[in-house]
Image (spheres, grey):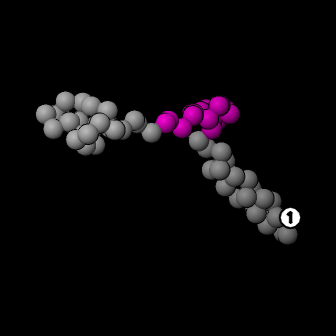
Amino acid sequence: MLHKIVIAVALATLAGSPAFSAPCRDAKGKFVKCPEKSAPAPKRCKDAKGKFAKCGAPGAKPA
């Protein structure tokens, strides 16, 4: 009876562990390379006329 409890606890523990590596597995459960985190989008600024300008230019505001 005790060995059944031990087996049940072990299976429950193993069932919870794939959640940690889920992002690095495909739909079939095979390990795959994790996707790279994308770089943040570059900031764009516009001048007073609404045209794109360098963010350091005078009068440029973030768009």
Magenta span: 24-39
Q: Nearer the viewer, residue 37 or 2?
A: 37
Image quadrant where one finds the N terminus:
bottom right
Q: Which residue is mark 1?
A: 3
* Quadrant of the rendered image containing residue 12: bottom right
Instruction: Tell me the chief SS of the magenta region.
Output: loop
Residue drawn where x is 69% and y is 52% of the image: 17
Vertical side of 15 occupied by 59: above or below: above
Vertical side of 27 occupied by 18: above or below: below
Residue drawn where x is 32% and y is 38% of the image: 55
17 displayed left or right of 23: right
* Quadrant of the rendered image containing residue 45: top left
Task: Give percent across and percent down for residue 48.
Answer: 15, 38
Q: Nearer the viewer, residue 19 or 57?
A: 57
Task: Give percent across and percent down for residue 41.
Answer: 40, 36
Task: Give percent across and percent down for residue 52.
Answer: 24, 30
Q: Nearer the viewer, residue 44 or 41?
A: 44
Q: Is residue 60 visible?
A: yes
